[in-house]
Image (cartoon, grey):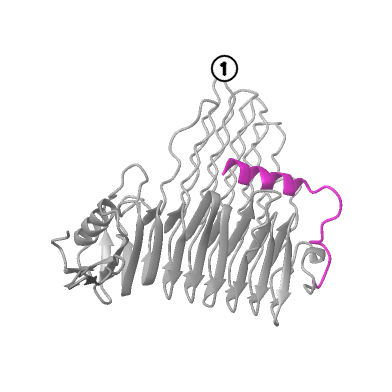
Amino acid sequence: MSNTGTRRRIATTVTALGAFALVAPPAQAAETAVPCDSAALVQAIAEANADPAPDTLSLAAKCVYTLTAVADSYWKAGLPSIEGKLTVNGNHATIERAKDAPRFRIINNWGDLTLNEVTIAGGHAPDGVGTNSSGDGNSGGSGGGIQNWGPLTITDSVISGNTAGSGGPGADATATTYAGSGGSGGFGGGVSSYSSSRVTLTITRTSIIGNAGGSGGLGGNGVAAKPGGRGGSAGYGGGIEALGGTVLRITGGGVSDNSAGSGGKGGTGGAEGGRAGNGGSGGVAGGAFVSSSRGVLLNPAIVGATVTGNQAGRGGDAGVAGPGGYSGFSGYGGRGGGLAVFDDNLTLDEVKVSDNAAGEPGAGSYPQPASGGGLHTLGARVTLVNGAVVSGNRPDNCVSPADVPGCVNDFRTAEVHGHDRRADAERAAVIRR
């Protein structure tokens, strides 16, 4: 049992009264009071992991637990990875990464985690380092605040100022190799959740604010007549990412002022007329990104919440061409300033999606206009009920109003007709994720 706080267990009592005995009540979760000290919090979680029974941690009221180093070096998390059933009663405390600390996320959850009245702030998933065997930059880490693989419940809390990792730069070309592409930015600046089986991500009366997806890495530079590498695609879901079997339920609170990552800049073409590298695509979904496995409907829902002031990612700039070489293509701006849904049916119940913005294209050849300031759907449908409204987003409200009955655009430039090359790039980014 913990020596860092007061641990209480409800004891079972069996009293014999002649031939009668009281039946022992079921075991209750252990409860630990955690002093206002970051080392004590790390120790309390480690001890909870070692205890097979459910555990509850009660944080010191309004304390700021400042983390300065990783506690889980493999998963690059400031706290030990959660392994069992754990409830953290925050009592309005904050768990934050120190501003001058190395980059690490706050929480990695493999168990069944409940957070009540706690602020998770300042996490930064690690950036991509090095390249793969093809010279492409490695991807940035996802989940700057929380990386989640199991059931997760967040109530009356704040997830703020967390950032996913940026992609690493691609390798420069050599006499025998071509320039590598930049690595992809990490997804889910505030919360990133993925599971191959069905798990719930339940967020109630919580503010998801000021978080950011990871930016794409720079493309490598060309040599001689070789082209520059493509900039990396940016991370999706500045505030929240829910992929695979994650069933997202948001009730109350708000998703605001989050941003998806920016696409990476293309590499410079070689000095003998090498073509400039193309800019990477900006991140989809400034606020929240939801994508189930294709053909499996999880029916996520957002109820009584606001989705405002979020920004999809800007496309990356093309690189500089070598003398006489061709210019590179502009990176696509990200769609879905507020929300993006792939391959599922989302219900917005008494929700306001407003004042969100799509990402602008990067500099370069053939820039595509920004679209999907409010909602972006791909193989998906969004149902508006009980006065839910999508309005006042820039430059439009919905990429495809046909997928969102009741959504009206002021003009039709965003509406999709025929084959959409950008959609192919968006799906490819999710697969790489």
Q: Is residue 144 visible?
A: no
> Does 278 appear above or below 291?
above
Q: Position of residue 271 (x, y in %)?
A: 61, 27
Residue at image coords 66%, 42%: 428
| Residues in magenta, as a range | 409-433
Residue type, label 1: Thr
Instruction: Locate residue 118 relative to residue 214 in the image: left or right.
Output: left
Q: Which element is circle 1 on?
A: loop
**The magenta stretch spans residue 54:** no
Q: Closer to the camera, 27 or 110? A: 27
> Does 308 appear above or below 427?
below
Instruction: Locate residue 394 relative to residue 234 in the image: left or right.
Output: right
Question: What residue occupies the far right of the structure in this picture?
Answer: 418
Q: Closer to the camera, 134 or 143? A: 143
Residue at image coords 65%, 36%: 276
Q: Position of residue 399 (x, y in %)?
A: 76, 62
**The magenta stretch spans residue 428:** yes
Q: Position of residue 139 (x, y in %)?
A: 50, 41
Q: Quadrant of residue 306?
A: bottom right
Q: Which residue is mark 1?
A: 176
